[in-house]
Image: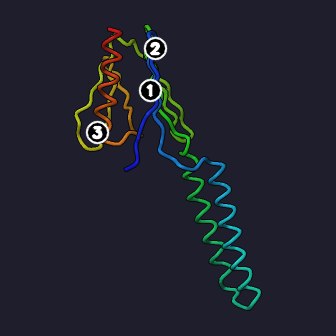
Amino acid sequence: MMQYQWQYDSSAERHQWTLRRNCILTPRQLAMWFVSLSALSLGIALFFASRGAWLILPFAIIEVAVLGTAFVCHARHASDFERIVSEPGRLRVEANLGQVSRVAEYEPSWVRVEYNGGWRAPIRLVAGRQSVEVGRFVPDHRKPVLAREMRAALSARG
């Protein structure tokens, strides 16, 4: 079974969690795979088209276009992350999802961590009427551990 881990750095003054998608290939490696698969597919199609089976070529072009679309969608989200940083007097939550980046800051002593343990339930950081969901890249069986870590770090601040 694959281990899912988040990066947790702590010191006396700072606690930081960095949560990322579990992606094996970087966008550059993915592009190299796409180019090689496209060249192979189009090469085979061109070979058969030169032998008279020209109808294979349009289907190979459609295949490469669909594969390219899937790879672009994957690459757009390959570098998604969430970062939670707790420092004296400030809790900062950064989220980069696709092309959208969000940043929220709270007073750490006012924040509570809510997690009900349900399947696909998010971890919520709640400060008054404001809340932000975190932990979308953490598997459900590891979310209780993350919630405990965050509660312990925030209670040490308060």
Mark 3 neighbour class, 10 Å CA radius: few under 14, some 14 to 19, many 20 or more? some
Q: Which residue is mark 3?
A: 121
Q: Sequence order check: which comes first, mark 1 or mark 3?
A: 1
Q: Position of residue 100 (x, y in %)?
A: 54, 36
Q: Residue at x 73, y 85 (%)?
A: 49
Give above or below for 15 relative to 7: above
Q: Position of residue 26 (x, y in %)?
A: 60, 47
Q: Residue at x 66, y 73 (%)?
A: 41
Q: Mark number for residue 8?
A: 1
Instruction: Identify the element where label 3 is drawn.
Output: loop
- C-alpha gap between disc 1 and disc 2: 10 Å
> Marks 2 and 3: CB-CB under 8 Å?
no
- C-alpha gap between disc 1 and disc 3: 21 Å
Q: Which residue type does callout 1 highlight?
A: Tyr
- C-alpha gap between disc 2 and disc 3: 29 Å
Give above or below for 86 relative to 97: above
Instruction: Identify the element where label 2 is drawn.
Output: loop
Q: Which residue is mark 2?
A: 11
Q: Which residue type does callout 3 highlight?
A: Ala
Q: Residue at x 34, y 30 (%)?
A: 146
- Mark 1 vs mark 3: give the one in front: 1
